[in-house]
Image (cartoon, rainbow, N blue to C red):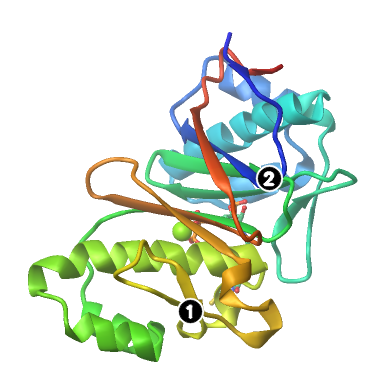
């Protein structure tokens, strides 16, 4: 069994989850998922999307149950006014992202937590997306890049932006061009709407997860450490 340290202030626990079919998946799902979760899963049209969504919900509940020290089925979720999922009645915050069969769950004691993962894929109209969704400063720096740098920088910046709009809870409604990241200095947040305070109040932590995949986690804390783990559903971790 995997033992992990209890979550501390200024830490994010970042869990990598593989969205593979689980043993006894249907019966686990029946015993754990809420009606809302079932409805959402069943709205997905493609069978592989339904399977991944089931796997996600089961593994998310197993993981959060470890932190909350309660039964997976008894965990209650709610959504804030822009639709960000939150846990009811606990000081624990989480955010999730999935891309293909990979998912990330970030867990922290800080509100203002967002995570994003994207596998690199061909993007038609990359220049148009940059024009519409990058900030002025990002666009200026983009012009100075060599063509062979475009794909990597595009996905790194994209995941930072998505992690930020998810951290604020606003989602795409905020407008991706309203936050800007430094392309040359480990992707720190440089510009954000005034209602979210100074950029220095946020920590942006890009994550190296493998080839042709970008990921970032952002949290409203001036400094923060990410501890990375891999979730094994048959051996949920124990907190020591
Ligand atoms: N803030 C933070 N997280 C949110 C969120 C919000 N407002 N809304 C949903 N999420 C979480 C959910 O847990 C969701 O997973 P789930 O649906 O399985 O529960 C997860 O983010 C999805 O993230 P990801 O896998 O990275 O998906 P994505 O790359 O498609 O991005 C959002 C999703 C959240 C950025 C996007 O759907 C969004 O902005 N939604 C909010 C509503 C909105 O603004 N709609 C306008 C659409 S034009
Ligand atoms: Mg995403």
Q: Residues within 10 Å of mark 1 (few under 14, many from 20)?
A: many
> Is the residue marked 1 within 8 Å of ligand 1, measured from its CB?
no
Upstream in sequence: badge 2 or badge 1: 2
**Where residue 160 appears, x then y in whole percent?**
44, 64
Q: Tell me where residue 14 appears, x and y as whole percent.
A: 54, 39
Q: Quadrant of residue 159?
A: bottom left
> Could you say where residue 209 lies in the image, as x and y percent from the top left?
34, 41
In front of the other: 195 or 30: 195
Q: Residue at x 71, y 37 (%)?
A: 8
Q: Position of residue 85 (x, y in %)?
A: 71, 55
- Give the residue pinned by disc 1: 176
Q: Is residue 117 visible?
A: no
Residue occupied by mark 2: 108
What residue is drawn where x is 86% and y is 47%? Answer: 88
7 vs 189: above or below: above
Residue 82 in view here: yes
Compared across the picture, whether 65 is left or right of 225 comes to: right
Instruction: Identify which residue is drawn at 73% across, 57% down.
Output: 111
């Amino acid at each position: 069994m995997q033992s992990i340290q209890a979550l501390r202030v200024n830490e994010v626990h970042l869990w990598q989850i593989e969205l593979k079919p689980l043993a006894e998946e249907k019966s686990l799902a029946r015993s754990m998922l809420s009606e809302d979760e079932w409805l959402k899963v069943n709205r997905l049209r493609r069978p592989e999307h339904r399977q991944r969504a089931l796997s996600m919900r089961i593994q998310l509940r197993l993981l959060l149950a470890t932190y909350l020290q309660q039964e997976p089925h008894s965990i209650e979720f709610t959504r804030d006014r822009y639709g960000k999922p939150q846990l009811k009645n606990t000081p624990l915050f989480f955010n999730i992202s999935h891309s293909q069969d990979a998912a990330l769950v970030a867990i922290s004691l800080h509100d203002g937590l967002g995570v994003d993962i994207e596998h690199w894929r061909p993007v038609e109209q990359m220049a148009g997306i940059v024009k519409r969704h990058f900030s002025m400063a990002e666009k200026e720096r983009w012009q100075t890049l060599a063509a062979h740098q475009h794909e990597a920088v595009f996905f790194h910046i994209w995941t930072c932006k998505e992690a930020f709009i998810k951290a604020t809870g606003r989602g795409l409604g905020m407008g991706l061009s309203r936050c800007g990241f430094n392309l040359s200095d480990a992707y720190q947040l440089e510009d954000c709407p005034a209602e979210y305070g100074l950029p220095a109040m946020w920590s942006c932590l890009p994550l190296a997860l493998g080839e042709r995949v970008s990921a970032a986690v952002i949290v409203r804390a001036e400094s923060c450490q990410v501890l990375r783990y891999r979730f094994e559903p048959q051996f949920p971790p124990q907190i020591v």
